[in-house]
Image: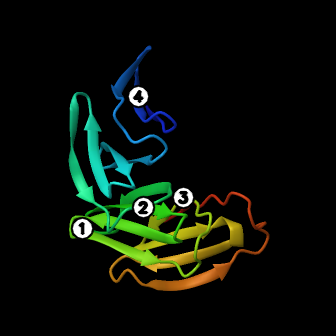
């Protein structure tokens, strides 16, 4: 289990009965964690960088398409079939999501302007992005980076947290 103290920029790993500090040099308040291919990735939004972290390892793991002023939740997963793993990071300050995979980096404007964005969910070649302050779901095509559709979420209250889940495929 890994956890991030974003306020001070430190990364910790819980191993057996011991908490190990892996890093203390992360930008305070400007990072998020996501798992990809068994690694822990640290997202440094302002630096537009991804860094792979493991025991005694810190190395670049990709890029982001420009700085992220307000990194929101990050999501990761397999885009489908033989496609590479993908990392998606939300930027609440601009209302955009940044996607990173083996082919590079791309940014998709959700068309919301600044908005509170929940944790993106990858499934079936698309990214489902909850826009929490609008109780809306935006669907982004991973292949093109284009917004495919958007849905009002009946029963969801604007401003409340929206959790997404894939069940039965």
Marks 3 and 4, Cα distance to the nearest angstrom? 21 Å
Instruction: Judge whether 123 appears above or below 109 on screen.
Output: above
Marks 1 and 3, Cα distance to the nearest angstrom? 24 Å
Query: Judging from the image, what secondary structure is the residue with disc 1 in?
Result: loop
According to the image, label 3 marks what residue? Answer: 119
Instruction: Judge whether 30 appears above or below 4 on screen.
Output: below
Horizontal side, residue 127 vs residue 55: left or right: right
Query: Judging from the image, what secondary structure is the residue with disc 4 in?
Result: strand
Marks 1 and 2, Cα distance to the nearest angstrom? 29 Å
Q: Which residue lies furthest to the top in this view?
A: 17
Query: Judging from the image, what secondary structure is the residue with disc 3 in?
Result: loop
Where is residue 38? Give x, y as percent: 30, 44
Residue at image position (45%, 69%) is 97
Instruction: Judge whether 153 appears above or below 34 on screen.
Output: below
> Sequence order check: which comes first, mark 1 or mark 3?
1
Mark 1 vs mark 3: in front: 3
Residue at image position (38%, 73%) is 107
Marks 3 and 2, Cα distance to the nearest angstrom? 15 Å
> Sequence order check: which comes first, mark 1 or mark 2?
2
Q: Which of 125 and 161 is in front in this view?
A: 161
Q: Which mark is residue 82?
A: 1
Q: Residue 157 carries which label?
A: none
> Sequence order check: which comes first, mark 2 or mark 4?
4
Marks 2 and 4, Cα distance to the nearest angstrom? 23 Å
**Label 4 close to label 1 by CB (< 8 Å):** no
According to the image, label 4 marks what residue? Answer: 12
Instruction: Judge whether 152 appears above or below 54 on screen.
Output: below
> Sequence order check: which comes first, mark 3 or mark 2?
2
Residue at image position (78%, 66%) is 157
Query: Judging from the image, what secondary structure is the residue with disc 2 in?
Result: loop
Query: Do we see residue 26 in this rendering?
Result: yes
């Amino acid at each position: 289990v890994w956890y991030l103290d974003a306020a001070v920029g430190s990364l910790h790993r819980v191993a057996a009965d011991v908490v190990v500090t892996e890093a203390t040099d992360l930008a305070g308040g400007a990072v998020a964690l996501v798992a990809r291919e068994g690694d822990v990735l640290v997202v440094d939004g302002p630096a537009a960088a991804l860094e792979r972290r493991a025991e005694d390892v810190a190395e670049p793991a990709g890029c982001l398409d420009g700085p992220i002023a307000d990194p929101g939740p990050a999501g990761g997963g397999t885009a489908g079939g033989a496609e590479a793993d993908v990392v998606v990071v939300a930027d609440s300050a601009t209302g955009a999501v940044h996607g990173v995979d083996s082919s590079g980096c791309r940014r998709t404007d959700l068309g919301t302007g600044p908005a509170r964005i929940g944790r993106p969910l990858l499934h079936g070649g698309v990214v489902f992005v909850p826009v929490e302050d609008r109780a809306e779901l935006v669907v982004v095509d991973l292949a093109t980076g284009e917004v495919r559709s958007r849905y009002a979420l009946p029963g969801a209250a604007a401003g409340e947290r929206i959790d997404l889940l894939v069940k039965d495929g």
